[in-house]
Image: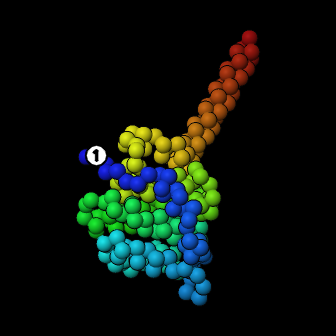
Amino acid sequence: MKMPMGPSVTHLKNRLVDCPSEYLEEPVLKESDRGVRVDAVVADLMLELGGELLTAREVARFGPESKYSKNQLRLVLVACWLLQDHKLRSCWTYRRAELAKRAKNWLGGDLLKLGALINVDEFIVDSERREELSRLALRALGFRPEGETEAVAQDRLTMVDSVERRRVLKETRERVERAEKLRKKMAEQRAREAASRYTRE
């Protein structure tokens, strides 16, 4: 099925530039902390999108006793601001509960992986990182950006995807290391064979 068209990447990037300071504050990591209750922000967003109340497990994921880092939870806050965009929500033509479900899955899944790699401030001040977050949000909700085909959208996302880039670099590094180990092993084998021939002669 063809993906519905969402707002443009430029529109979402501009929204990130305008992220209010409240969404950039420190998250509450333990009950005695002052700051933003990320679980409450996520819960409000879910209700706003037509979803259900968070389960106790979901509250724990985003709440004061979360196992996730401050940076990861701050990125969840920034993403909540992005997902509140009226254009993004008005493009959705299916059941609203499905929109909330997709948003929650992204906030509690792949987005947290991204938050473990990149400082959240980069998604505000750096154009490429704003594009990455915008494209990831669109894909998570099942949209293609305005003015782009699905193929073009996927190509452009691949170019800016930090998680994918790290994965490719890791695989490349591992292949190089394996090739180097094999080269050394073969060199040692050739040296042993040469020594054996020399001894026989």
Does residue 159 sit above or below 72 in this rendering? above
Picture quarter containing residue 152?
Answer: top left
Can residue 30 be seen here? yes
- Rendering coords of residue 34 (x, y %): 60, 85
Query: Which residue in the rendered view is the most extreme toward the top?
Result: 201
Amino acid under disc 1: Lys
- Rendering coords of residue 176 (x, y %): 62, 35
Describe residue 79's horizontal placement relative to residue 88 as left or right.
right
Front one among 70 and 7: 7
Judged from the image, the secondary structure of the residue bearing numbered disc 1 is loop
Please name the residue shown 58% across and 38% down the image: 172
Can residue 68 be seen here? no
- Rendering coords of residue 194 (x, y %): 71, 18
- Rendering coords of residue 82 (x, y %): 47, 64
Q: Which residue is mark 1?
A: 2
Describe residue 22's horizontal placement relative to residue 136 as left or right.
right
Picture quarter containing residue 95?
Answer: bottom left
- The quadrant of the picture occupied by the C terminus is top right
Please name the residue shown 61% across and 32% down the image: 179
Does residue 175 sit above or below 43 in this rendering? above
Please name the residue shown 48% across and 56% down the image: 11
Front one among 176 and 99: 99
Colour setup of the view? rainbow
Does residue 138 sit above or below 79 in this rendering? above
Describe residue 188's horizontal placement relative to residue 78 as left or right.
right
